[in-house]
Image (spheres, grey):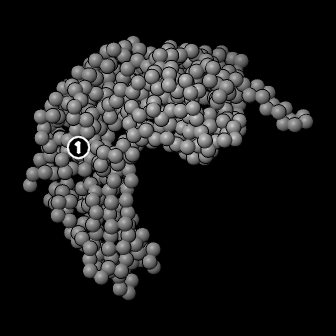
Amino acid sequence: MNPMQDILDHYRDPEHFGVCDGHTHTCHSKNVSCGDEVTVYLKIENKKVIDFSFEGKGCAISVAAMSMLSDEIIGMHVDDIQKITPDFVVDLLGIEVGPVRLKCALIGLDATKQAISEKN
Amino acid sequence: MLKELFPIFNEKSDLVYLDTAATALKPRVVLKQMLDYYTDYSSNIARGFYPIADMATQKVIDARKKVAEFVSAKPNEIVFTSGATDGMNKVALGVLGKISKEKSDLGSLNVVVCENEHHSSLLPIVAQAQNFGLKIKVAKEFSEIESLIDSKTVLVYVTLASNVLNHNVDVASISRVAQKHSALVLVDACQAVSHRDVNFQELGCDFLVFSGHKLYGPTGVGVLVVKESVYSKLDPIFFGGGAVEDVSFEEDVQITLKTGFEALEAGTLPIAEIIGLAAAVEFVSEISMKTISLNEQELSKYLLSELKKLDFIELLEPDLTHAHVISFNITNVHSHDVAFMLGQKNICVRAGQHCAHLLHKKMGLHGSVRVSFGIYNSVEDCDRLLAELKEINSMFNKR
């Protein structure tokens, strides 16, 4: 599929959007320069992510990146989540992302890492 | 036709550059002048006793004259800075710092700003007012500024042309009111200077700043115009070579600063950039501000009329007929997505909050897409933009 079409599909109908039941970790993050906001919810047991969701508003890149990442995160060990690189997110998106737009792409990942580190 | 004067279009013939309010493209003549300095007479100014140093020194003296003439000021009223933000900080800290040494009732004094302003200009004044404990009066609209000025006002900040919206700010009137109360007026002319004639004397203000890069000149250079009689109200905030008359360590440490612009230009100036800025001023003057303004008006009229035909376009200022900036959104599409998709087609616009967060917050917007014209733009550029906006709307809003 055309990567941009894939991004638009995720943007219109994101995976794991909302608040998951029984979440143990959460973090709200905001990009003041563009007004994008995301809140992530993680249910973590024995350092493993059992469930994950997010909600918020943002551009297609930020929402699609979070949507694509959500499937990857569920089942991961928290230490492995901390090791996720920006390149991994860019690869998921499948398009080139410049340094300015990278902030959009990473807002959800950064919030997820912060949610884990704040409570660990 | 002016595209051929800008080397960037040689390499990128399909480039549609509609972000001149962020920075203007550079004409060949500016680049050549800078390269000539580096290749033919690279040397420091006002120090060397050899021909190439004399040549560089003379170029900077000439540049000061050209820039002064360009804004109807005197050469000794021109202070070269690294950009408008540098100029703002020099004024904010220089004026308020001096007042703080002379007066004890700082809490009763105030500064006046408007929340529609660009961050870079608001923040230096607001931050220094906070630092020295002065009150900060914030006008909701430019029209409110005059009514906030009183006998306790020491500094008023006003922008000549916003980088998001199109306002006609009567700076001369604000200056008159401020003068009655012995308040100083600082004007940001960054956006205005590349679109219309700016006359420092007629504005009646005390300080005026602009950046070279928005005027088809290089980055790293700007101008702070200081009314001759006001230098005494401005303490230098940087010290170093070229700004000092004499230093003595014999008994007590004695530092005697130079006066006027020299006191505010410590250290080696950005010589190549100043020469480039002078070339840009000449370039713009030769084309004439009238021609630039007319071209811009025609293009903005055309684009606005076409944008108004599109039901998915939400203009921030729907009543405008012509403008130096056109800000809008596509319904239900994030401004970053619009700019990104346009960028994929080599169409350059700005998206986001354009360093005017307070303004966007007030308008209830996450951001906006901004189109701004330069002397290289044409109706074809507008048509390319319009066609792509239709595509983006189809992509995002039609399943």
Q: Chain of mark 1?
A: B
Choose between B29 and B216: the one closer to the eye: B216
User: In the rendered view, does B62 fall on the left or right side of B13?
Assistant: right
x%, y% of residue B45? 65, 23
Choose between B173 and B347: the one closer to the eye: B173
x%, y% of residue B339? 27, 44
User: In the rendered view, does B191 fall on the left or right side of B4?
Assistant: right
Count of numbered circles on the image: 1
Look at the numbered disc 1 and give the secondary structure of its residue. strand
Q: Quadrant of residue B216?
A: top left
Q: What residue do we see at 28% from left, 69% from top?
A: A54
Classify the position of the C terminus of chain A by image quarter.
bottom left
Q: Can residue B146 be seen at all in this image of the molecule?
A: yes
| Residue with the mark numbered 1 | B329
- Where B340 sits versus B160, above or below? below
Q: Can residue B38 be seen at all in this image of the molecule?
A: no
User: In the rendered view, does B138 fall on the left or right side of A8?
Assistant: right
Choose between B55 and B261: the one closer to the eye: B261
Classify the position of the N terminus of chain A by image quarter.
bottom left
x%, y% of residue B363? 30, 45
Q: Quadrant of residue B230?
A: top right
The disc labelled 1 sits on which kind of residue? Answer: Asn
User: In the rendered view, does B46 fall on the left or right side of B227?
Assistant: right
Q: Farthest residue toward the bottom?
A: A46
